[in-house]
């Protein structure tokens, strides 16, 4: 054996001996030590003695095999004590397991005899080789039997105790699994086993660390096994085992393939390496690995502290480079359940849940149909809807029922009020929602709802501040108007006395021009038409009003009327103001050679007025986010109140406004207003005032 490997083997076994001795002494000093803890302490101390004996020499020393047999027997005895405690109060056949224990004990006794025979007695070469081979086979059989008993112990343990025993049993499985690989290679290729014997000391040191985690139950409330460290440690162990298996396969190939061994070895190593590089980065494989580790090593699915810190960091990220709040909320909730995508739905003015934004959801139409009232009512009660269950799609809109990646919908509730919901995509490892998922999604939904409500409150405050700024500027303009009125009043008073004076008339004209210029400047500062006083709703003919508006605007741009309009029940002044707003917007957006079309008709019990232009159009995002928001305008110098005020006026009269637009093609604004009943229709020839 090379000097370096000899040093690694000696010091590795010495480290393992120190760790096992410390653990055994610590268990023996516990005042509440039970029988199973004393058995574990004895196994640790005997393992420490075996490792210390190996560290002073090597596995070639006469009593090394006997020490290993004592080590195995002590651990099997401790396992049997644990198994009897797990059997307490249970029914069922137990003779088979006891028989396996007896068989493994017989193997240990037999290999002790054979090991001492070839070491202590002078035998012929063939007989000694046969005894050595027999010893190796017996040790492999002992390792296999011990692994079977480990599995039996884990399967009969109560579910609530498995998470505590998993580190201990996993460490023992690693110890006997390494022994099996070691003696298998020692049997088929003895010249290659020296390095594995040397590295066993370091493995036993790692085993001691995991055993410590498994036996320190009294610290379970204060010391928690780090999931990140567990994942990394198990990953390193798996990689190491993978390398050992590759080495074992290479040795077997060299023995079997003969002259083609080198070619077959290179092909096998290349294939396994490429397979690992392809499979290991797979998100699904990583998800399966995380689920299995969490299932078998931890009591709970989630590391609540880590998940909550990650949730807060994601949702609270700020700066110009960060995503909008809606996307951050969707991602933060999706990361909890390892969902690859999520959709944020917010409650609109009609109480439905409409798509607001999404994170990583492909081919999503932002104008998708809203969530129906039945599902919204369930969400408002705090229910998390498992969309994978049969029957849930019956109340879903078509786009939701046809999307196969939908998985669950969690409500966003703020102070008992539903403000939205998060739609989660199916995680890479498909599973049903359990109680931990439900608790985490409820808590995350409440926290996300608080962030969204705060952002909405800040937006409302900003709008109020902008309205306040508008009022302040309007007050300044009223002051200027007052000065103009005073000036014009004085001019009117003097005109009665000096109307015949040519100089006065010239001065009056200049004053009027200056006043008109100042008033136009003030109107430009407001960028908004004057609002006439509202009247009571009454029945009137819509056609004359539209003809008059078209005639007024046709002086600057072509306006064409198509169809006939029924009588409506509305406020004539507000109706004129709504149509003027939208017609003027259509004219502003249209090229000079493209007319604006006003198309009239009726739909159900409402009058329909379509105002169509062939202008620049608008994007779906601008319509959803900006069009009907105050102070948002796509026109240079616009104040952004026209569309906002038009919709508010239409809603006040019992109507509504809908928009269809496509960037580069044009827009269609549709106004719906209530029809007049037969008894309220105006007399022939009556027009709107």
Image (cartoon, rainbow, N blue to C red):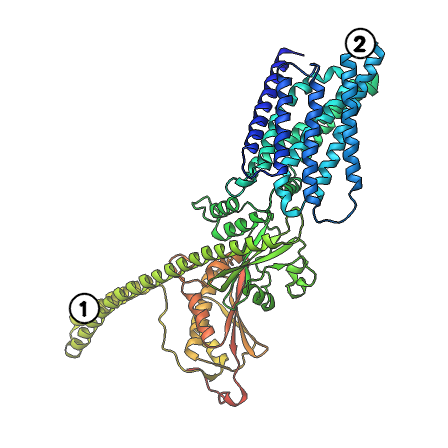
Q: Nearer the viewer, residue 265 or 622?
A: 265
Report the number of discs. 2
Secondary structure, mark 1, is helix
> Would you call the spot at circle 2 few (<14 residues within 10 Å), some (14-19), or many (20 or more)?
few
Determine the residue positioned at 76% across, 32% down.
Answer: 145
Determine the residue positioned at 44% across, 72% down.
Answer: 578
Quadrant including the N terminus: top right
Q: Which mark is residue 507?
A: 1
Do residues under tags 1 and 2 come within 8 Å of each other at their CB atoms?
no
Residue 263 visible? no
Q: x, y (%) of residue 297?
A: 62, 41
Residue on which disc 2 sits: 122
Quadrant including the C terminus: bottom left
Q: Nearer the viewer, residue 489 or 336?
A: 336
Vertical placement of residue 494 versus 149, above or below: below
Q: Nearer the viewer, residue 530 or 622?
A: 622
């Amino acid at each position: 054996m090379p000097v370096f490997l000899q040093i690694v083997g000696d010091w590795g076994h010495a480290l393992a001996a120190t760790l096992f001795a410390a653990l055994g002494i610590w268990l023996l000093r516990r005042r509440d030590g039970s029988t199973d803890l004393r058995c574990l302490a004895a196994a640790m101390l005997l393992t420490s003695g075996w490792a210390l004996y190996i560290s002073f020499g090597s596995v070639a020393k006469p009593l090394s095999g006997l020490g290993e047999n004592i080590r195995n027997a002590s651990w099997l005895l401790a396992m049997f004590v644990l198994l009897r405690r797990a059997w307490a109060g249970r029914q069922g056949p137990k003779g088979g397991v006891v028989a396996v224990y007896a068989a493994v004990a017989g193997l240990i006794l037999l290999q002790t005899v054979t090991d001492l025979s070839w070491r202590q007695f002078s035998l012929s070469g063939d007989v000694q080789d046969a005894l050595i081979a027999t010893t190796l086979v017996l040790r492999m059989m002992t390792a296999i039997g011990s692994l079977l008993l480990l599995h039996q112990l884990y399967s009969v343990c109560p579910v609530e105790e498995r998470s505590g025993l998993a580190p201990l049993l996993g460490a023992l499985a690693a110890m006997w699994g390494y022994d099996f690989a070691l003696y298998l290679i020692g049997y088929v290729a003895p010249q290659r086993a020296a390095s594995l014997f040397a590295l066993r000391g370091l493995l036993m040191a790692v085993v001691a660390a995991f055993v410590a985690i498994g036996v320190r139950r009294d610290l379970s409330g204060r010391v928690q096994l780090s999931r990140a460290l567990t994942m990394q440690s198990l990953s390193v162990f798996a990689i190491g085992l993978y390398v050992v298996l590759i080495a074992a396969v290479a040795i077997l190939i060299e023995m079997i393939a003969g002259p083609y061994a080198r070619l077959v070895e290179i092909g096998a190593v290349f294939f396994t390496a490429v397979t690992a590089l392809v499979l290991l980065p797979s998100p699904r494989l990583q998800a399966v690995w995380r689920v299995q580790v969490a299932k078998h090593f931890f009591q709970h699915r989630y590391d609540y502290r880590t998940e909550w810190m990650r949730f807060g960091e994601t949702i609270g990220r700020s700066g110009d480079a960060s995503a909008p709040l809606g996307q951050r909320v969707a991602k933060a909730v999706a990361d909890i359940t390892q969902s690859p995508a999520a959709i944020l739905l917010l409650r609109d003015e009609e109480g439905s849940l409409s798509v607001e934004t999404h994170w990583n959801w492909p081919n999503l139409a932002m104008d998708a149909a809203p969530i129906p009232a039945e599902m919204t009512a369930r969400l408002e009660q705090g229910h998390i809807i498992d969309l994978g269950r049969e029957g849930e799609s019956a109340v879903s809109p078509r786009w939701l029922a046809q999307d196969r990646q939908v998985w669950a919908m969690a409500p966003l509730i703020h102070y008992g009020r539903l403000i939205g919901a998060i739609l989660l995509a199916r995680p890479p490892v498909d599973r049903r929602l359990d109680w931990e998922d439900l608790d985490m999604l409820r808590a995350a939904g409440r926290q996300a709802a608080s962030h969204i409500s705060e952002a909405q409150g800040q937006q409302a405050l900003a709008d109020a501040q902008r309205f306040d700024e508008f009022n302040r500027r309007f007050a300044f303009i009223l002051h200027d108007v007052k000065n103009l009125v005073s000036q014009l009043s004085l001019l009117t008073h003097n005109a009665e006395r000096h109307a015949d004076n040519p100089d006065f008339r010239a001065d009056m004209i200049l004053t009027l021009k200056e006043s008109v210029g100042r008033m136009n400047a003030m109107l430009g500062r407001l960028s908004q038409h004057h609002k006439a006083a509202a009247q009571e709703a009454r029945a009137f003919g819509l056609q004359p009003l539209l003809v008059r508006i078209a005639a007024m605007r046709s002086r600057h741009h072509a306006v064409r009327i198509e169809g006939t309009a029924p009588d409506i029940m509305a406020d004539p002044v507000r109706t004129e103001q709504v149509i003027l707003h939208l017609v003027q917007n259509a004219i502003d957006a249209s090229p000079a050679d493209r007319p604006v079309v006003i198309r009239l008709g009726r739909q159900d019990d409402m009058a329909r007025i379509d105002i169509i232009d062939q202008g620049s159009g608008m994007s779906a995002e601008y319509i959803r986010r900006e069009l009907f928001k105050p102070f948002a305008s796509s026109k240079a110098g616009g104040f952004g109140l026209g569309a906002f005020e038009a919709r508010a006026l239409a809603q006040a009269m019992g109507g509504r406004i809908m928009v269809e637009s496509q960037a580069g093609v044009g827009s269609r604004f549709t106004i719906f207003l209530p029809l007049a009943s037969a008894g309220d229709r105006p007399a022939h020839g009556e027009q709107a005032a």
